[in-house]
Image (cartoon, helix red, strand yellow):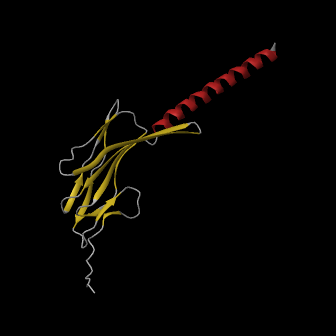
Amino acid sequence: MLQKARRRKIGNRLSRAHWMTMGLLVFSAVLSAQEGRSFYLEVAADTVGLGDVVEVRYTAENLEGQFVPPDFDDLVLIAGPNQSSSFQFVNGHSSQQVSHSYFFKITDTGDLSIPMAQFETADKVIESKSHEIYCMLREDSSIREHRIGDQRPRALMAPPKKKLKTRKI
């Protein structure tokens, strides 16, 4: 009789420990699912030349909702919006990323503001930061494309070459 009571106590302890462990696992899963949530703006370059093409990307990480693009009144849109998405599930953890990218042609010198965008979730609206870039005149007349992740801008159009003088013989 005493042995049965002990087994019951041990069984109750195990079941309590089991439920507490399960509760902690669920709680940590909820916390880890909320980690890494962000909405941000990336710009390919901080300083560009007149006529250059610049990539601008708005990225939402681990967010469910709707992207609300800004008004690009002062910018000349060349391409976009281009949307890309990725989903990863590694070791029981999932993550997702959705990006909206635009390509703009720089048509004026001086400071230029890339506006903030919004991402609407079920319970709130998240805003990205805006970003300032400086546009300058370049000595050569080349046009470059600035892409996010590139070390150097790509030449879209090289400056005109000087004509060589030729003589007829």
**Front-most of 59 and 123?**
59
Seen at 62% across and 30% down, the residue is 21
Report the residue that reaches farthest toward the front: 169
Res 80 quadrant in image: top left
Vertical placement of residue 67 versus 136, above or below: above
Residue projecting furthest to the top: 1
Q: Residue furthest bottom?
A: 169
**Position of residue 144 in the picture relative to residue 108 (left or right):** right
Residue 38 vertical position relative to residue 110 in the rendered view, above or below = above
**Position of residue 139 measured from the top left corner of the image (x, y, whole percent):** 24, 73
- Residue 43, horizontal then vertical, whole percent: 33, 54
Can residue 37 be seen by looking at this rendering?
A: no
Q: State left or right for residue 106 relative to residue 36.
A: left
In this rendering, position of residue 112 left or right of residue 34: left
Query: Does 47 sit above or below residue 40?
Result: below
Query: The C terminus lies in which quarter of the figure?
Result: bottom left
Labels in figure, total: 0
**Along the line of sight, which residue is nearer the eye, 68 or 168?**
168
Percent x, y of residue 148: 38, 55
Q: Is residue 85 visible?
A: yes
Q: Quadrant of residue 147?
A: bottom left
Q: Depth check: 31 or 75 in front? A: 75
Q: Which of 100 and 142 is in front in this view?
A: 142
Query: Residue drawn 26% across and 84% down?
Result: 168
Q: Where is residue 134 in the image (x, y as percent from the top left)?
A: 24, 62
Residue at 32% in and 53% down:
55
Q: Quadrant of the N terminus?
A: top right
